[in-house]
Each structure stands twice: as C-alpha cells, then as structure tokens.
Amino acid sequence: MPGNEQSLLQRTTDFPAGQPVIQLAGISLRYSQSAAHIQALADINLELSGDDFVCVLGPSGCGKSSLLNIIAGFLQPTTGTITVDGNIHSKPDPQVGVVFQHPNLFPWLSIEKNIEFGLKMKQVGKEQRKELVAHYLQLVGLDGFAKLLPFQLSGGMKQRAAIARTLATDPRMILLDEPFSALDAFTRETMQKNLYDIWHKTRKCLLFITHDVDEALLLAKRIIIMQPNPGRIVNDFPNPLLRRPEQAFSRLRSAKEFNDMRQFLIGQIHS
Ligand code: ADP
Ligand code: MG
C-alpha cells in the first residue's frame, strides 16, 4: 500500500461526519417537452450527512433518476434549492461525484489513466496522482489491472474502475444510479460487498438509487422510499438491519428480520 492509508482515506475529514453535506429544499420538477406536462418530482426536502449511505428505493418512473440528475447538477429543478456545505449548487460540480449504470470510462485510456484523469483536472501533482491511483486501484481490487484498457475488463471490473475514478477525486458525496443493475447476480453481490466495504473504510456520503429491495436492505444505513405521480418521498428511516462488515450477506438474507423488512418495504413501495 503506497503512502499513508489514513491520510489518503480521510481527505474529507475537515468536515465532521454528522454535519450536513447537502440540503434540498422544496424541490419539484416538471418536464414540459411536449403538450403533456409530467410532474416528475414534488416537494422534495432532504438533508444528507457526511457519513450517510442512503438508498433511494422506488418503482420505475417514480423520479429516482430525475432526483439524481438534479443533485448532480445536470437538470435544473422547477422549484427549490440545493446547497452543498451551505453554498448554492446548481450545476455539475466536482464536489458531487456520479457513478452511472453503465461505466463511462474513456475507452482509449488505460484503467490507471482513467482514474488519473480527474486528478489531472484538479491539478494534483504527479507524485500524489501516482500514489492516489495506486491506492484507489487497490481499494476496489483492481491492482494488477492498471495498464489494461476498459474493453479488456469485465462489466463488474469496469464498474469498479468507475467507482475508483470517482472516489479518487475526493468529492463530498457520490451519487450512484442503479450501478449494479446491468451485472449478473453473482458479480452484483461481489460489487455490493465491495461498495459496502469501501463505504465502511471511507465513510463517504453515498446516495445510491435502486429498485431492488434486497440491495437496499443489504447496503443502506438509511432508506428513502419514493412513490410516483408525482415522484415524492413517502418514507425516510434508518435501516434497522445495518450490517457489520464481517456479517455474511447470506446470513443476513436468511434472518427472519430481513424477510419481515423486505415485506414491509415491498408494501411501502406499492401502497
Ligand atoms: P425512475 O428513475 O424512478 O425510473 P425517472 O426519473 O427516470 O424515474 O422518471 C420519472 C418520470 O419522469 C417518468 O414518468 C418519466 O417518464 C418522466 N421523464 C423522465 N425523463 C424525462 C424527460 N427527459 N422528458 C420527459 N419526461 C421524462
Ligand atoms: Mg432511473
């Protein structure tokens, strides 16, 4: 492991963990591209803290991606404001990293150069770039694959590279829009474990969108439920099953509490 693990992992600890990173107040969104208007989001109020791992759970069409695109600064809300560390946030900003469903790596750059790209943009010096790239490759389990091009990696490995690239720039929070939904079940579970371990080590604020109830229960520290027409938050609570890193997924899945929570969440989504 190059450098000092603590100093690399805790580059954002100038901010106390429980302090709000991002605040959304009165967010609504109306798509008006055709004669028919769609009220995609209504009255969203939300506050995320430095060490939150929030899963936003809801059926297709309830506005999850619209919400993520607004927080990322890709879309302007019709009403409402967003602040990051107290400053108005209205356009894409390096403080808010995004991991998409399909990893959008630069196909002509090696994995290490992909991770290094954002650090160059941030004008991080060469030596530190090298150290950070090696550190994040190791964190996502891709050390040994640094020189390969994206097409030489499996889907799961590409997604890990995309996560490493986002983490390396040390954003205040990371948005993930169904990042594992295109992966096969086995790879998805490996990725879920990997992401949870990363969160446990870095305590980075993560907003993770999913329509998979099990995924939310296995990963989240906090669960937010959305319903459609218009897209809105109907519940927001700490995950009572928050897992310790050493606890096996299979153990948790087979527990009665897990099944009870699953039924509860399915009921909430479809009520
Ligand atoms: P989810 O991610 O939960 O599936 P979306 O945010 O993609 O939901 O969509 C919420 C609603 O907004 C849906 O009714 C969808 O059809 C509509 N919608 C999404 N994107 C657009 C767009 N660019 N133009 C018009 N309507 C859109
Ligand atoms: Mg979506």
Image (tube, grey):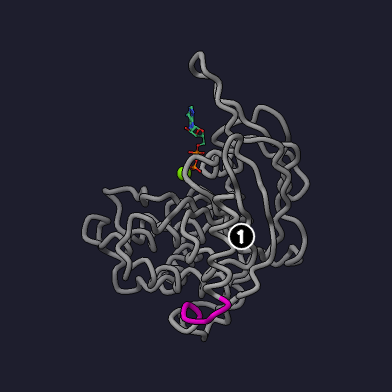
Image vertical order of residue 229 relative to residue 154, above or below: above
Of 49 and 26, nearer the camera is 26
Residue 244: name its quadrant: bottom right
Residue 16: name its quadrant: bottom right
Please tell me which residue is depicted at 53% across the width and 67% down the height of the picture: 262
Q: Which residues are drawn in magenta?
A: 252-257
Of 235 and 27, nearer the camera is 235
Please tell me which residue is depicted at 52% across the width and 71% down the height of the picture: 218
Instruction: Report the residue marked by disc 1.
Output: 54
Please tell me which residue is depicted at 74% across the width and 37% down the height of the picture: 26
Residue 145 pos. (x, y %): 29, 69
Residue 254 drawn in magenta: yes
Q: Is residue 119 left or right of residue 71?
A: left
Q: Main secondary structure of the magenta part?
A: helix
Residue 169 pos. (x, y %): 53, 56
Image vertical order of residue 186 relative to residue 104, above or below: below
Q: Residues within 10 Å of mark 1 (few under 14, many from 20)?
A: many
From this viewpoint, which residue is outermost toward the left? Answer: 152
Residue 8: name its quadrant: bottom right
